Image (spheres, coloured by chain):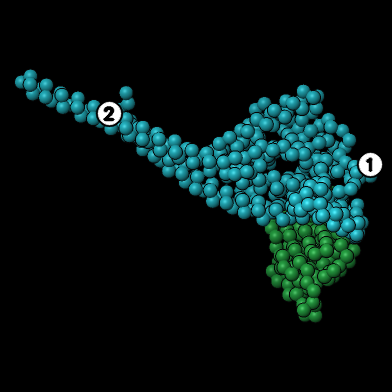
Amino acid sequence: MPSLKDLKNRIASVKSTRKITSAMKMVAGSKLRRAQENAEAARPYAARMERMLSSLAGDLTPSESSPRLLAGTGKEETILLVVMTSDRGLCGAFNGSIVREARRLIRQLEEEGKTVKLFCVGRKGRDLLRRDHADKIVQAVSEIGRKRLSYDDADKINAKILEMFDGGEFDVCHLVYNRFQSAMTQIVTVKQFLPFAVPALSDVDSASGKKAAEERAAFQAALEFEPDEKSILEALLPRALAVAVYGALLESAAGEQGARMTAMDNATRNAGDMINRLTLNYNRSRQAYITSELIEIISGAEAV
Amino acid sequence: MADTFTFELVSPEKLLFSKPVAMVTVPGGEGEYGVLSGHAPMITTITPGVIQIYEEENAGPVERIFVAGGFAEVSQTRFTVLAGEAVPVSDLNRAALQEQAKAIAGKIDSANEHDLAALKTQQDVIAAKIQAAA
């Protein structure tokens, strides 16, 4: 049985924990809003890039002459997984679920007899994967967008990936990241990154119906290119890939804040429950203590 | 008033400009060109240089924006520029740029082959900025 003093200390400590978690929740909330705004602001560029790409490469079938980024190396032996996690913990299952998915993929790919390499973005993922897959980690970056996630950060990561691709270090690349759905839910997503999958024209236009697609086709035929289709495509592809990385990073950043907010909200609530329980305990022990003291006094007086 | 069309300038981080305009001139990969309403659809690359936006065909440009390369797409109703970096020309500081140019030139001298290409591009961008600021 803990003494009264112990209980009191315990209550004080849980109370200060609750203060911290509720402050963290608030901070995560405002960061989440900012991250969402960033993600929102980046959407127009990505959408237009996609449209332009599909205009350029929509009817291009992968062939010997098409750019390597589109056609791939023709093999599927070495797979690079880009695992995007956060730098900091205390965000619930955010990093855990990504790492779990990465481990599952690694196992699956290895069973198929493929070589797996890992590119860890974010410190947590690197720390967790280092335990059992240290030999596979070929690159790791952390502290991405501490202050504000910028396009340059994404561009740097993209440049590293492309450099490895040019060096023939892998054949296929997948991004593993958390897609932000709401503050409560992040969806672990695996997305093919290289060779680049060109969004089909029909995908882009499906929302606006068939007529739009027809108009689009007519427009397509009339398109002029300057300098020429191929060199534009070659210049555009690395940019499109950087945009894909940027998009994933933004989603992941928003997801992280969302996960942290939810986790901290739960922690705050649990701390509240715990304080109630402890307070009840404390009051009970205090009363028991008073009662037993009274009994002692009374029985002492009776004895005289 | 002359016919207008929507001009959009987008950087990866946000939509910078989206307004109806009368004419826009952009530094294309094969020379500067102007776009008026009803231009034939096309896709071009953009080299570092200045985009000039005209709200009236005969008046001077209302806005001059420096872009560090990118892509442009003309469609029936819209003219979209996907820029890498975009700064209003009025924000360019000539003295500071010349400092940067010197720093880059110094780096190029001592750079290895690996970094050379990237530095050269940076140098081109800064040179274009200085020209724009003049």
Secondary element type, mark 1: loop
Task: Name the kind of residue labelled 2 in the image.
Answer: Ser
Please report the residue visible at 69 percent of the width from the left and 45 percent of the height from the top: A248
Residue A247 makes an appearance in the image? yes
Give the mark nearer the N terminus: 1 vs 2: 1
User: To which residue does mark 1 refer?
Assistant: A64
Secondary element type, mark 2: helix
- The N terminus of chain B lies in quadrant: bottom right
Please report the residue visible at 40 percent of the width from the left and 34 percent of the height from the top: A274
Q: Is residue A236 above or below residue A139?
A: below
**In the picture provided, is A287 more to the left or to the right than B94?**
left
User: To which residue does mark 2 refer?
Assistant: A285
**Which chain is depicted cyan?**
A
Provide residue A231's location: percent of width, then percent of height. 90, 53
Q: Chain of mark 2?
A: A
Please report the residue visible at 59 percent of the width from the left and 44 percent of the height from the top: A182
**Which chain is depicted green?**
B
Extreme top residue here? Answer: A303
Q: Residues within 10 Å of mark 1 (few under 14, many from 20)?
A: few
Provide residue B68's location: percent of width, then percent of height. 78, 61
Front residue of A52 and A161? A52
Q: CA distance from mark 1 to mark 2?
A: 82 Å
Extreme left residue here? Answer: A304
Provide residue A147's location: percent of width, then percent of height. 60, 51
Q: Is residue A5 above or below residue A231?
A: above
- The C terminus of chain B lies in quadrant: bottom right
